[in-house]
Image: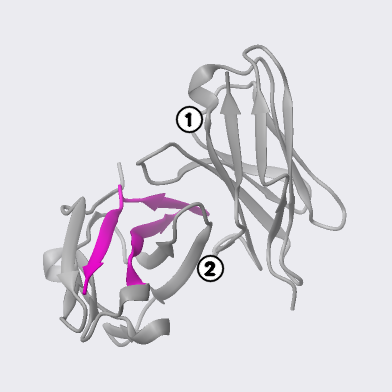
Amino acid sequence: ETGVTQSPTHLIKTRGQQVTLRCSSQSGHNTVSWYQQALGQGPQFIFQYYREEENGRGNFPPRFSGLQFPNYSSELNVNALELDDSALYLCASSSARGETQYFGPGTRLLVL
Amino acid sequence: AQSVTQPDIHITVSEGASLELRCNYSYGATPYLFWYVQSPGQGLQLLLKYFSGDTLVQGIKGFEAEFKRSQSSFNLRKPSVHWSDAAEYFCAVHQGGKLIFGQGTELSVKP
């Protein structure tokens, strides 16, 4: 059974740029959730995708957007990057909306 | 609003000593509760979870946690800590499909 994978592992961008992060869910899982973890903080929920539809969103501006594909992999897109967007971005998959979430290794984004 | 509090930001224990990490939650209904562990620069690994039933749950790596509804707590315990347990530990409550995390407790293990 393949676990949750994320790419890239690290990324450096400058303010105002756009970034796309990718996540492949665990085999058999149809739900993907994205979290932002700032340094020294717990993860904060960004949004969740279930069967290619957004299924819940946290307190993040619209410049954070996402997609889920028919194979249940997902992308997180962030436009107009700001310095405060520097964080570890975690993807988690689950077999259904209410089930246990399993996390990938994360993508560390640095915005200069 | 639902919330999770981990009162201890940093704990240091000696190798072989027992460990208890505290977690308090605020949630109206019966909560789904989780403990995750994060090594430096890594993602989160699930240690254990509580959905219902027996209030003492066993997890991986010798960890256990006890759900106490009267105290709104879900404390994590381990009888004998190993140096490899040094990491950050997060308690989380499940709400409407998302996880709400505490701030985390950093565990250091001294020889």
Label 1 with label 2: CB-CB less than 8 Å: no
Q: Main secondary structure of the magenta part?
A: strand
Q: For the point 66% across and 68% down, which residue is it?
A: A95
Q: Secondary structure at mark 1?
A: loop
- Residue A108 on image: x %, y %: 58, 40
Q: Residue furthest front?
A: B111
Label annotation for residue A59: 1
Chain letter of the residue carrying label 1: A
Magenta region includes residue A73 = no
Q: Secondary structure at mark 2?
A: loop
- Residue B93 on image: x %, y %: 37, 58
Of mark 1 and mark 2, the one earlier in the sequence is 1
Q: For the point 53% across and 57% down, which residue is it?
A: B43
Image quarter in which the N terminus of chain B is found: top left
- Residue B81 on image: x %, y %: 25, 80
Q: Residue furthest right?
A: A70
Q: Is residue B43 above or below residue B63?
A: above
Magenta region includes residue B93 = yes
Label 2 environment density (alpha carbons within 10 Å; few <14, some 14–19, many ≥20): many
Quickly name the residue at label 2. A100
Q: Which stretch did the figure color magenta?
A: B85-111
